[in-house]
Image: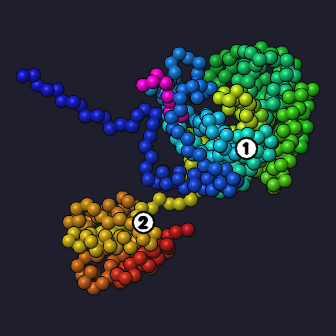
Amino acid sequence: MAKVKKQPRPKAVTPKGFRDYFGAEVEDRRHMLDQIAGVYHRYGFDALESSGVETVEALGKFLPDVDRPNDGVFAWQDEDDTWMALRYDLTAPLARVYAQHRNDLPTPYRRYAMGPVWRNEKPGPGRYRQFYQCDADTVGTASMAADAEICAMLSDALEVVGIPRGDYVVRINNRKVLNGVLEVMGVAEGETRDAVLRTIDKFDKVGEAGVRELLGKGRLDASGAYIDGVGLKDAQAEPVLRFLTSKGADNAETLDNLMGAVGDSEIGQAGVDELRQIADLLAAQGYGPDRIVIDPSVVRGLGYYTGPVFEAELTFEILDDKGRPRQFGSVAGGGRYDDLVARFTGQAVPAVGVSIGVDRLLAALREKGRLAHEARGPVVVTVMDRDRMAEYQAMVGELRAAGIRAEVYLGNPKNFGNQMKYADKRQSPVAVIAGSDEFDAGKVQLKDLILGAKLAEDATLEEWKDRPSQIEVSRENLVAEVRKMVAQYDG
């Protein structure tokens, strides 16, 4: 009889391009998103949790034009031959939801959404195939008040999570202004216009001189390779450069410069007028250029958005992998997209929104030490006598009822040292200790594990040395004394 081949054990590895999030990371993200949700709710936005799965047809605008339907998304074919996919972002689902339920939704419809999205793309350092997004959108109004409101709300959200004024700026531009510039240049729809847009998108990397070269004959990049240019003449390229360098000393000067850049273009003038409306509306609410500013150098996303576009940039410096200082950069972006819902309805529906890069914003807060809370585990009730488990459970029940995070040690109680190691690994602030002697006397021992860790680091610390690391309290005062011990490390 042939020997049955043993099935190999599965490898315990995270799939390529994905990662696991543990307690402190999850808590930090939850806390930050709760704070942002509070701002959105205050502005009158409603929460929406749409399906994590959409039909590929609904996501079509975001997919490459290729034969394989799941290129760019994680997709599969259902039993009825319908192609479905994990959502690529939170905007396409919103367009589908609004088109499907528009008769039951208010107009305009304000919604915010937070959750994971999935992209079937090549992973890299800090680039994962699953990540969190945090979006807010207003659908159904063309009023620039909606755009101004999104920018103000983004500013408030950054401040409430711990990014103070001076450490960020929300910058605003307008696709219509760029369209006006392209009109003045005489660049029609087609390959040349697409090439100009791609070149403009490189402005933050290569600067004015680099864009000038790329719009013309071309340039040598940092590696020495020659990059062919668009082939425009200097006079033809000049309006683009005027547009990109239009930022003045204040919003009024910037808007005047932009009006000069668009010349007689009606669409360009309309775009400048929209920026002027937004600036006036923000100024009326007290959002000055220290927080939100008109800035024509914001060019990312101009190929997708149909009107105003904005980006939140953190302006403080961090050190890169080689120890060199650099600015942290963008953590959020958005703009007006008036064509998306029309895919479903056949009718243009104006919309504007913003998306915050959750992981990047968390990284920024962590870099500056501005996460709102320190990771801390539960109070651990140790077990000295397993026959009295009901009494230990009674203690932990009282602590939990009082709102104190707590647990009973459920491992082998024979080795007390292992219980203390467990409490340390759990980052517990306090261990509750009670054996037969304590129970008979109506007492419990409370061990201050945070103080113990501090003394282990440096026993000479003046602020710690006069405080006892373990105290005995009456059983009836357990909750009050634990709360007191934990509270001295809060705030």
Q: Image point 32% across, 66% down: which residue?
A: 408
Against 291, residue 7 (above or below) is above
Query: Mark 2 — residue?
Result: 405
Residue 419 visible (yes or no): yes
Q: Position of residue 58 (x, y in %)?
A: 58, 29
Q: Specify the quadrant of the image occupied by residue 444.
A: bottom left
Check disc 1 and give the amino acid type.
Pro
Q: Magenta region: which residues?
A: 79-87
Residue 387 left/right relative to 97: left
Q: Image point 91% across, 31% down: which residue?
A: 260
Against 475, residue 299 (above or below) is above
Q: Which dot marks residue 381?
A: none
Q: In which quarter of the image is the N terminus?
A: top left
Q: How far apart are marks 1 and 2 (CA)?
A: 42 Å
Q: Decide: marks 1, 2 in contact (CB < 8 A)?
A: no
Query: Mark 1 — residue?
Result: 108
- Nearer to us in this view, 308 or 186: 308
Q: Specify the quadrant of the image occupied by residue 421.
A: bottom left
Pick whichever of labels 1 and 2 is earlier in the sequence. Answer: 1
Q: Specify the quadrant of the image occupied by residue 66.
A: top right
Q: Image point 36% across, 62% down: which residue?
A: 424
Check disc 2 and give the amino acid type.
Arg
Residue 248 visible (yes or no): no
